[in-house]
Image (cartoon, rainbow, N blue to C red):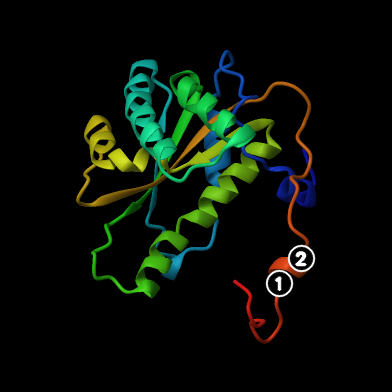
Amino acid sequence: MPTLDEALTTTRTVRRRLDFTRPVDRELAQQCLRLAVHAPNGSNRQDWRFLLVDDGHTKEAIARHYRRAFEIYLAGRAPTGAIADSARHLAEHLHEVPLLVLACMAGRLRDDDPPARRSSFYGSVYPAIWSFMLAARGRGLGTALTTVHLRFEREVAQLLDIPFEHVTQVAMIAVGHTTGSDPGPAARRPLADVVHWNRWPAATT
Protein backbone atom coordinates (compact mmCIF):
# COMPACT_ATOMS: atom_id res chain seq x y z
CA MET A 1 0.00 0.00 0.00
CA PRO A 2 1.61 3.30 -1.05
CA THR A 3 1.76 6.19 1.39
CA LEU A 4 -0.63 9.07 0.84
CA ASP A 5 2.11 11.19 -0.73
CA GLU A 6 3.14 8.32 -3.00
CA ALA A 7 -0.44 7.74 -4.12
CA LEU A 8 -0.94 11.43 -4.83
CA THR A 9 2.20 11.67 -6.95
CA THR A 10 2.07 8.31 -8.75
CA THR A 11 -1.59 7.89 -9.66
CA ARG A 12 -0.95 8.18 -13.37
CA THR A 13 -3.11 7.60 -16.43
CA VAL A 14 -2.58 3.93 -17.27
CA ARG A 15 -3.46 2.87 -20.80
CA ARG A 16 -0.76 0.63 -22.26
CA ARG A 17 -0.05 -1.22 -19.03
CA LEU A 18 -3.59 -2.30 -18.22
CA ASP A 19 -3.79 -6.08 -17.95
CA PHE A 20 -6.63 -7.10 -20.24
CA THR A 21 -6.41 -10.76 -19.19
CA ARG A 22 -7.09 -10.35 -15.47
CA PRO A 23 -10.61 -9.48 -14.27
CA VAL A 24 -11.19 -6.85 -11.61
CA ASP A 25 -12.98 -8.41 -8.68
CA ARG A 26 -16.29 -6.70 -8.01
CA GLU A 27 -15.63 -6.47 -4.29
CA LEU A 28 -12.31 -4.76 -4.99
CA ALA A 29 -14.11 -2.15 -7.08
CA GLN A 30 -16.69 -1.75 -4.32
CA GLN A 31 -13.91 -1.11 -1.80
CA CYS A 32 -12.66 1.76 -3.94
CA LEU A 33 -16.15 3.20 -4.29
CA ARG A 34 -16.78 3.00 -0.53
CA LEU A 35 -13.83 5.34 -0.11
CA ALA A 36 -14.75 7.50 -3.09
CA VAL A 37 -18.17 8.43 -1.74
CA HIS A 38 -16.56 10.11 1.26
CA ALA A 39 -15.36 12.88 -1.06
CA PRO A 40 -16.61 16.43 -0.52
CA ASN A 41 -19.53 17.54 -2.66
CA GLY A 42 -21.90 20.47 -2.98
CA SER A 43 -24.28 20.77 0.01
CA ASN A 44 -23.53 17.11 0.76
CA ARG A 45 -26.24 16.14 -1.73
CA GLN A 46 -24.25 13.11 -2.87
CA ASP A 47 -25.79 13.34 -6.32
CA TRP A 48 -23.07 11.19 -7.86
CA ARG A 49 -24.02 7.90 -9.46
CA PHE A 50 -21.65 5.17 -10.67
CA LEU A 51 -22.43 2.58 -13.31
CA LEU A 52 -19.91 -0.26 -13.48
CA VAL A 53 -19.66 -2.30 -16.66
CA ASP A 54 -17.85 -5.64 -16.81
CA ASP A 55 -20.08 -7.45 -19.32
CA GLY A 56 -18.16 -8.18 -22.49
CA HIS A 57 -20.95 -7.49 -24.98
CA THR A 58 -21.82 -4.21 -23.29
CA LYS A 59 -18.18 -3.10 -23.32
CA GLU A 60 -18.00 -3.92 -27.02
CA ALA A 61 -20.99 -1.67 -27.69
CA ILE A 62 -19.56 1.19 -25.62
CA ALA A 63 -16.22 0.80 -27.39
CA ARG A 64 -17.84 1.25 -30.79
CA HIS A 65 -19.21 4.65 -29.74
CA TYR A 66 -15.90 5.50 -28.10
CA ARG A 67 -13.89 4.77 -31.24
CA ARG A 68 -16.21 6.91 -33.35
CA ALA A 69 -15.78 9.78 -30.92
CA PHE A 70 -12.04 9.23 -30.75
CA GLU A 71 -11.61 9.58 -34.50
CA ILE A 72 -13.49 12.89 -34.39
CA TYR A 73 -11.30 13.95 -31.48
CA LEU A 74 -8.13 13.15 -33.42
CA ALA A 75 -9.37 15.14 -36.40
CA GLY A 76 -9.53 18.25 -34.24
CA ARG A 77 -7.09 19.62 -31.71
CA ALA A 78 -5.59 16.51 -30.16
CA PRO A 79 -2.30 15.40 -28.58
CA THR A 80 0.52 14.06 -30.71
CA GLY A 81 3.44 11.73 -30.17
CA ALA A 82 3.51 9.26 -27.28
CA ILE A 83 0.35 10.58 -25.66
CA ALA A 84 -1.61 10.22 -28.89
CA ASP A 85 -0.28 6.69 -29.39
CA SER A 86 -1.26 5.78 -25.83
CA ALA A 87 -4.73 7.24 -26.26
CA ARG A 88 -5.20 5.34 -29.51
CA HIS A 89 -4.13 2.13 -27.78
CA LEU A 90 -6.89 2.61 -25.22
CA ALA A 91 -9.45 3.36 -27.94
CA GLU A 92 -8.51 0.26 -29.89
CA HIS A 93 -8.64 -1.98 -26.82
CA LEU A 94 -11.40 -0.39 -24.74
CA HIS A 95 -13.61 -3.45 -25.13
CA GLU A 96 -10.85 -5.52 -23.50
CA VAL A 97 -10.53 -3.33 -20.40
CA PRO A 98 -11.73 -5.46 -17.46
CA LEU A 99 -13.91 -2.77 -15.90
CA LEU A 100 -15.42 0.50 -17.10
CA VAL A 101 -16.78 2.90 -14.49
CA LEU A 102 -19.14 5.61 -15.68
CA ALA A 103 -19.27 8.48 -13.21
CA CYS A 104 -22.55 10.36 -13.44
CA MET A 105 -24.48 13.14 -11.73
CA ALA A 106 -28.18 13.18 -11.01
CA GLY A 107 -29.70 16.06 -12.96
CA ARG A 108 -28.69 17.93 -16.10
CA LEU A 109 -27.45 21.45 -16.58
CA ARG A 110 -29.40 23.94 -18.68
CA ASP A 111 -27.77 26.03 -21.38
CA ASP A 112 -28.37 29.20 -19.37
CA ASP A 113 -27.03 27.90 -16.04
CA PRO A 114 -24.50 30.38 -14.60
CA PRO A 115 -20.81 29.50 -14.12
CA ALA A 116 -21.23 28.96 -10.39
CA ARG A 117 -23.93 26.35 -11.00
CA ARG A 118 -21.76 24.57 -13.59
CA SER A 119 -18.74 24.60 -11.31
CA SER A 120 -20.76 23.20 -8.42
CA PHE A 121 -22.32 20.50 -10.60
CA TYR A 122 -19.08 19.06 -11.95
CA GLY A 123 -17.10 19.92 -8.84
CA SER A 124 -19.44 17.71 -6.82
CA VAL A 125 -18.35 14.53 -8.59
CA TYR A 126 -14.73 15.02 -9.64
CA PRO A 127 -13.37 14.75 -6.06
CA ALA A 128 -15.09 11.35 -5.82
CA ILE A 129 -13.64 10.32 -9.19
CA TRP A 130 -10.14 11.23 -8.02
CA SER A 131 -10.68 9.45 -4.69
CA PHE A 132 -11.72 6.35 -6.59
CA MET A 133 -8.57 6.51 -8.69
CA LEU A 134 -6.38 6.96 -5.60
CA ALA A 135 -8.07 4.04 -3.87
CA ALA A 136 -7.55 1.92 -6.98
CA ARG A 137 -3.87 2.88 -7.08
CA GLY A 138 -3.54 1.78 -3.46
CA ARG A 139 -4.92 -1.64 -4.39
CA GLY A 140 -2.67 -2.29 -7.36
CA LEU A 141 -5.13 -1.16 -10.00
CA GLY A 142 -4.46 1.22 -12.85
CA THR A 143 -6.97 3.76 -14.10
CA ALA A 144 -7.46 6.01 -17.11
CA LEU A 145 -9.95 8.85 -16.92
CA THR A 146 -11.55 9.80 -20.23
CA THR A 147 -14.41 11.94 -21.47
CA VAL A 148 -14.11 11.13 -25.18
CA HIS A 149 -17.30 9.06 -25.29
CA LEU A 150 -19.41 12.04 -24.19
CA ARG A 151 -19.69 13.16 -27.81
CA PHE A 152 -22.15 10.27 -28.03
CA GLU A 153 -23.49 10.53 -24.50
CA ARG A 154 -27.10 10.09 -25.57
CA GLU A 155 -26.30 6.92 -27.53
CA VAL A 156 -24.35 5.44 -24.62
CA ALA A 157 -27.17 6.39 -22.26
CA GLN A 158 -29.66 4.55 -24.46
CA LEU A 159 -27.39 1.52 -24.57
CA LEU A 160 -27.09 1.40 -20.76
CA ASP A 161 -30.68 2.45 -19.91
CA ILE A 162 -29.43 5.68 -18.32
CA PRO A 163 -32.30 8.22 -18.25
CA PHE A 164 -30.57 10.88 -20.35
CA GLU A 165 -32.83 13.79 -19.32
CA HIS A 166 -32.29 13.12 -15.63
CA VAL A 167 -28.74 11.75 -15.33
CA THR A 168 -25.57 13.28 -16.80
CA GLN A 169 -22.54 11.19 -17.65
CA VAL A 170 -19.45 13.10 -16.53
CA ALA A 171 -16.55 10.76 -17.24
CA MET A 172 -15.54 7.16 -17.81
CA ILE A 173 -12.73 5.41 -15.97
CA ALA A 174 -10.99 2.40 -17.48
CA VAL A 175 -9.86 0.12 -14.65
CA GLY A 176 -7.58 -2.90 -14.60
CA HIS A 177 -4.68 -4.57 -12.89
CA THR A 178 -1.36 -3.36 -14.22
CA THR A 179 1.65 -4.98 -15.79
CA GLY A 180 5.28 -4.02 -15.24
CA SER A 181 6.74 -1.94 -12.44
CA ASP A 182 4.92 0.62 -10.32
CA PRO A 183 4.71 4.07 -11.88
CA GLY A 184 6.81 6.95 -10.65
CA PRO A 185 5.84 10.62 -10.42
CA ALA A 186 4.96 12.37 -13.66
CA ALA A 187 6.96 15.33 -14.93
CA ARG A 188 5.31 18.56 -13.86
CA ARG A 189 6.03 22.26 -14.32
CA PRO A 190 7.78 23.95 -11.39
CA LEU A 191 5.45 25.64 -8.92
CA ALA A 192 6.89 29.02 -9.85
CA ASP A 193 5.25 28.65 -13.27
CA VAL A 194 1.77 27.95 -11.98
CA VAL A 195 1.44 29.47 -8.49
CA HIS A 196 0.88 33.16 -7.79
CA TRP A 197 0.38 35.02 -4.53
CA ASN A 198 -2.09 37.85 -3.91
CA ARG A 199 -2.15 39.21 -7.48
CA TRP A 200 -2.11 37.72 -10.95
CA PRO A 201 1.19 38.69 -12.59
CA ALA A 202 1.15 40.97 -15.60
CA ALA A 203 1.30 39.41 -19.07
CA THR A 204 0.71 35.90 -17.69
CA THR A 205 -1.95 33.42 -18.83
Kind of residue indicated by mark 2: Leu
Crowd tier of the residue under label 1, counting other residues whose Cα lies within 10 Å: few below 14, some 14–19, many 20 or above: few
From the viewer's perspective, is residue 4 above or below residue 122? Answer: above
Q: Is residue 43 left or right of residue 2?
A: left
Of residues 121 and 183, the one nearer the viewer is 183
From the viewer's perspective, is residue 157 above or below residue 105? Answer: above
Of residues 79 and 95, the one nearer the viewer is 79
Q: Is residue 64 left or right of residue 112?
A: right
Q: Which residue is mark 2?
A: 191
Q: Of all residues shown, which one is farthest toward the top?
A: 21
Q: What residue is at 48 percent from the left and 18 percent from the top? A: 96
Q: Which residue is mark 1?
A: 195
| Residue 103 visible to an observer of this rendering | yes
User: How far from the left and from the top, in percent, is residue 33?
Assistant: 52, 42
Quadrant in which the N terminus is drawn = top right
Q: What residue is at 35 percent from the left and 71 percent from the top? A: 117
Q: Is residue 1 left or right of residue 40?
A: right
Crowd tier of the residue under label 2, counting other residues whose Cα lies within 10 Å: few below 14, some 14–19, many 20 or above: few
**Residue 60: assigned label:** none
Q: What residue is at 52 percent from the left and 36 percent from the top? A: 30
| Residue 35 visible to an observer of this rendering | no
Check whether the beta carbons of the residues at disc 2 and disc 1 lie within 8 A of each other: yes
User: How far from the left and from the top, in percent, is residue 12?
Assistant: 66, 41
User: How far from the left and from the top, in percent, is residue 58?
Assistant: 33, 22
Q: What residue is at 68 percent from the left and 43 percent from the top? A: 11
- Quarter where residue 70 is shown: top left
Numbered disc 1: secondary structure? loop
Quadrant in which the C terminus is drawn = bottom right
Numbered disc 2: secondary structure? helix
